[in-house]
Image (tube, helix red, strand yellow):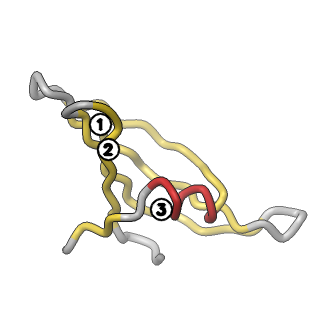
Amino acid sequence: MQIGAQYRRVVSGNVTETAEVLTITTDSLQIPHVRFMVRNNLPEGSCAREQRTLSAESFTRLFSERVAS
């Protein structure tokens, strides 16, 4: 996983989330976290964006499909 890389997952039905890694940091307990911008592509064609943070382990489990750049 690296900054700028994009990953995708299907949430439910036809909703797809694409996450772009913004930063990778380590907290005070030495647990790595990923801050990322997620874009939800909805079936009706609209798109929602928001910034999120997850532990690196959770991020890798949820967003396992890397998007080719």
Within 10 Å of disc 1 (Cα), the crowding (few <14, some 14-19, many 20+) is many
Q: Any mark on residue 10, and which? A: none
Residue designated by label 1: 40
Discs 3, 1 touching: Cβ within 8 Å: no
In the displayed structure, does residue 55 sit left or right of residue 13? right
The disc labelled 2 sits on which kind of residue?
Answer: Glu
Quadrant holding the C terminus = bottom left
SS at mark 3 in the image: strand
SS at mark 1 in the image: strand
Q: How far apart are marks 2 and 3 (CA)?
A: 15 Å
Looking at the image, is 50 positioned above or below residue 20?
above
The mark that comes first in sequence, 1 or 2, is: 2
x, y percent for residue 33: 66, 61
Dot in front, 3 or 1 = 1
Discs 1, 2 touching: Cβ within 8 Å: yes
Residue designated by label 3: 22
Within 10 Å of disc 2 (Cα), the crowding (few <14, some 14-19, many 20+) is many
Dot in front, 2 or 3 = 2
Q: Which residue lies furthest to the right in this view?
A: 29
Residue designated by label 2: 17
Front position in the image: 21 or 65:
65
